[in-house]
Amino acid sequence: MSEVIQKETMLSFIDGEINSNADSVAIRAINVRGKEALENTPFPTRKDEEWRFIDLNTIKKNSFTAVSEANAVDVGDISNHYLPEALNTRLVFVNGIYNEELSSISDLPNHVIVGNMSEYGDHDAVKEHLGTITNYEDDAFAPFNDAAFEDAAFIYLPEETSVEAPIHILNVFTDADKAFYATPRLLFVGEMYSKATIIEEHIGLANNLYLNVPVTEFRLFAGAHVHHARIQRDSKSAAHVSRPIAMIDRNAEYHSYTICLGAKLFRNDPRVIQNAAEVDFTVDGLVLIDGDQIADTHSIMDHRFPHGKSHQLHKVVVNDNAHSIFNGKIFVAKDAQKIDSFQENRNLLLSENGKVNTKPQLEIFADDVLCSHGATIGHLNDEEVFYLHSRGLTEQKSRELLVYAFALESVESMEVESVEKLLLEEVIKYTTRD
Amino acid sequence: MLEIKNLHAVVEGEDIEILKGVNLKVNAGEIHAIMGPNGSGKSTLSKVVSGHPEYEVTEGEILFNGEDITELDADERAHLGLFLAFQYPVEVPGITNRTLLREAYNTIARANDREELDPLEFEDYIESKLDVINMKDEFLNRSINTGFSGGEKKKNEIFQMAVLNPVLSFLDETDSGLDIDALKVVSEGVNKIANDENAIVMITHYQRLLNYIKPDFVHVMMDGRIIKSGDISLAEELEANGYDKMEKELALNGEAQ
Ligand SMILES: Nc1ncnc2c1ncn2[C@@H]1O[C@H](COP(=O)(O)OP(=O)(O)O)[C@@H](O)[C@H]1O
Ligand SMILES: [Mg+2]
């Protein structure tokens, strides 16, 4: 009897068939594309350069079913997670499935669309842009989302429309009998000179294991300005693998901030692709991890045209046995002159056993550019601790304040007051230990 | 109030002895000045008294109101009313002066069973202290010492002293970094804070500061010991003749080994 040794794929950890029943032709086409890619893409191993440091056991040692098979508990009342600024600009997805009852989108300017994509499957912007920029090479995760998603957040801004209220995309995950997978999807299309703030949240309501594989696509046309905050507060047992990508045109600004607080395993590969000259973008991150958490950010800032300005401040605090990995790639194409790119990765290690891997990676083929990068790994400064301590604060309190101060800068970029407040509370929760 | 007896201290984990038998007694209502050449151990003395973990006391004791405080943590000493104005105040980005002072004030109040101040009450209180050394309001919103000039940092130390209202303050070279205008303002502030119930130990290299804050006692520190004590005339003598001459004289008289 001969046996063909099959390489592991994403499907090796999925229990049952992946069946999506999307009505939309556009979504179904992506589902089919995803399934094909999945079968042909090996699951990453430590031998792959981009996966060298990360321990994927939270996925590999488990198997995940569709939500429908997991006997998930009812979502219940989640109004404590609503943002006061976005009371009527909110979409709620429970375990990746759109929940109309909990969503509220009554407060939108004319012709702006914020809704479940399956209702807008025939919209030109969906047909034209869905799945067009998410080509992560040799990737098992974006195709998994492609294959499995049915519902999705769809945000469409016509030319010169500005949405005042932040748009809240609230993904919550409930407890369940079995470990399940979820594939939240978000497509944002901003036509010329449109403007919006998007708060994308992932919240685990219990401590269960699940696999969250979101894909977000942001297509910004000329002059569009978007502020995109991503707050990851998944269950501390969960695995979360994210593919957020943006492509931006001339005079566009895309500022993204990813806050990582939850998940046992977090892998995030943000990418911004410059699609014309004169852009400005941000790929900031704040990671606060402890226990056995793993957080890995592999970002790409892809400068393909002249006169781009980009900024990345990736701040990390590691406690206990947690492990942070950062690989920040800055690409500058041959003709992309006058690029002004800044990257900094600052790591604060609070424990003996915490681990940090950091690697800036610059690939610059233009000669007239300004690219700076730096990475630091440090402990709290003893003199700073003593200064506060000598003023009457306990040593513990002094340390907490200093960690708080370290994280503060990233929180202050949030622009939405309630989000800032919520994050400050999270930071205090993280720094305060007993 | 403070009694330091035969204090010896080393750098934690190393053999180098920096304080080699310091004796000093300070009573309520007194202002003392400690002068001495660079490297004689003045800053180390102030840090050891305030509980800096970098140093280890190997012999002797520090009595504060009769209680030996050598084993206390820095915050516990602050709760008893000890304060150190640092020679080199540390920059702490991200924490505002207001945050530190409110946290410090209330922690000390709590430790002494006094009422804490709520944010509004604290605001009134801290405003009233700004005048002590002509500080502007906006200063409270700035991160501790971050981007401050040398003079601003020193002023900030005295401002903190005014807010925390300590019983015993060590002012380590508060005059360095101050121009003559700031020196006058800061001195005036210190004089306002000084009263019959508290005490101040100034560490300085020059006699100048002592023209504005009049000490009751002047001590000369050399090589980890206080080798001579007297009144203000001792400072004048030092200014006129320098430390070298005094060291030689003392050696001749057999007062220093
Ligand atoms: N942490 C330390 N490690 C090593 N040497 C130190 C340390 N702190 C102080 N010293 C040494 O102790 C001596 C006294 O220093 P210091 O107290 O700062 O003097 P002063 O304030 O009188 O100028 C100096 O020789 C200094 O180098
Ligand atoms: Mg000194």
Image (cartoon, coloured by chain):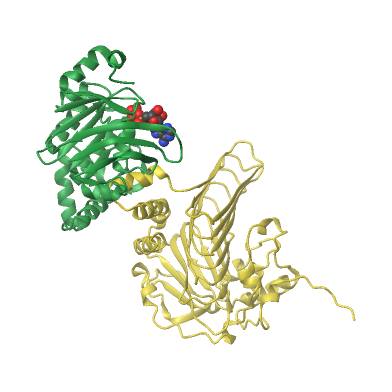
The answer to whether one can see residue B93 in this image is no
User: Does A138 appear above or below A20?
Assistant: above
Identify by letter the chain in green: B
The answer to whether one can see residue B111 in this image is yes
The residue under the point 73% across, 68% down is A41
Residue A283 pos. (x, y %): 52, 54
Residue B80 pos. (x, y %): 22, 48
Is residue A38 rendered to the left or right of residue A343?
Answer: right
- Residue in front for this viewpoint, A115 or B99: B99
Residue B84 pos. (x, y %): 27, 39
The quarter in which the C terminus of chain B is drawn is top left
Numbered disc total = 0
- Residue furthest to the left in view is B196
Q: Which image quadrant is residue B146 in?
A: top left
The residue under the point 54% across, 68% down is A264
Residue B49 pos. (x, y %): 29, 40
Is residue A321 rendered to the left or right of residue B192?
Answer: right
- Residue furthest to the right in view is A1
The quarter in which the N terminus of chain B is drawn is top left
- Residue in front for this viewpoint, B243 or A133: B243
Q: Colour of chain A?
A: yellow
- Residue in front for this viewpoint, B226 or A386: B226
Q: Which image quadrant is residue A133 in?
A: bottom right
- Residue in front for this viewpoint, A149 or B168: B168
User: Does B248 appear above or below B184?
Assistant: above
Q: Which image quadrant is residue A239 in?
A: bottom right
Ligand 1's quadrant is top left
